[in-house]
Image (cartoon, coloured by chain):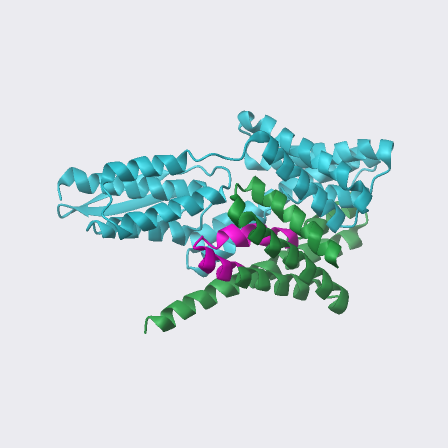
Amino acid sequence: MMMTWFYGFISTVGLSILFNIRRKHIVLAAIGGGSAGLIQQQLLLSTDNILLAAFVAAFVISIYSEIMAGIQKAPSTTYVIPGVLPLVPGAGMYYTMLYLAERNLSQAAAYGYQTVFAALAIACGVIIAPSIRRLVRQLRSY
Amino acid sequence: MTHSDQQSILNLALATGELLLTSGAETYRVEETIDRMCQSRGVAGESFVTPSVILVTGIIDGSPITHMKRVHPQQIDLHKIDEANNFARSFTASDMPITTAWEELNRVANSLQYPLPISLLGGGLAVGGFAVLFGAPAGQFPLAFLIGVLLQLFMVTIMPLRLNFFLRNIVASFVVTILIHLLDRLFALAINAMIIGSIMPLVPGVAITNSVRDTLTGDFLSGLTRASEAVFIALGIAFGVGVGLVLMTGVLPV
């Protein structure tokens, strides 16, 4: 479990460098990325539901990003973008192609379906936190 | 305020918006920044932004003047978004003179990227981490790291060719698939995990995230544009990997 978090952390550090995030934000962004990967993996193991795992992990990471953005006075994209990337179904995409190349159409279709819906689940997860922030802002201005 | 003062505020707001947009900021952030910068100096303005164009209209001496700026997306640069955001905030919160503002904005626009060795390190860490995360044994981390470094080096090398994003993703994922299959003959790699790890830095996570955020704020046009970008990036990667797999495993698809 620690290892999953650790490798998620490392890869998010790498991505953060590629996105030109500065040092003071990198560690926080990578903590988010590592945790997102871990949450997704654990949920996948316990519920065997790819959509739920992707959704919950994306939701947690977007909440985390909004909070960190508020504390650090930085745009929340600085944390959301590298944090969400470990969740993106690159593996599903790859296996879809692999099975297509092996002419195993039913497996390819199964993985293709998972990939598309996992991407949609991430999208739904990411949408909620900024919505809540807007709501809070509006309630305050009443 | 004179006519040309108002003009230059409009220009400044437009340039700030362009910097934000080319670095990969969300649509609402760009629009809000432009509007606020205009309003802070008493120029009634309105803006409309999509990923490829910025339109700004300011009422100058009673008559509307519109600027249209075609924008070409560049590399995602979250540091520039952060800095441009801070700049716009301090501009609207103070009475910073226009000349100082331009200097400040130029400083942000020319702020440095990480030097090549660091970005190679970034590519290596990303691919290495993802490869292990997707099931490669930890002992193969160094090899995955090396592949990531090579991939990043390749991306930097083909940058001057100005390939469009579709072709760039096809080429990169094709090359990396071939490379991993060749390395496998020497070292017996966890091929699947390695390839997945290598395509993770290419995968359209940014486009998906921004597409959703744009749609949420009511910028449906931008949301759709970015969603189609995400689809085509994914298709490009899938195509590159697919062709690589077919070549290296010797089976033809259906």
Screen quadrant of the C terminus of chain B: top right
Q: Is residue A107 visible?
A: yes
Screen quadrant of the N terminus of chain B: top left
Instruction: Tell whether A66 sits left or right of B240.
Output: left
Chain painted in green in the figure: A
* Dominant secondary-structure state across the stretch colored magenta: helix
Q: Quadrant of residue A109?
A: bottom right
Q: Residue at x 66, y 41 (%)?
A: B237
Out of B211 and A12, give the one closest to the viewer.
A12
Q: Magenta segment: does it hold A69?
A: yes
Instruction: Tell whether A16 sits left or right of B243.
Output: left
Q: Position of residue A37 (x, y in %)?
A: 67, 56
Q: Position of residue B21 (x, y in %)?
A: 42, 44
Q: Position of residue A52 (x, y in %)?
A: 66, 66
**Does residue A123 lie above or below B162 as drawn?**
below
Out of B160 and A142, give the one closest to the viewer.
A142
Q: Residue at x 60, y 44 (%)?
A: A15
Tag count: 0
Instruction: Tell whether B235 sits left or right of B51.
Output: right
Q: Quadrant of residue B244?
A: top right
Q: Quadrant of residue B217?
A: bottom left
Chain painted in cyan in the figure: B
Q: Residue at x 74, y 69 (%)?
A: A47
Q: Magenta segment: does it hold B106?
A: no
- Extent of the magenta region: A65-87
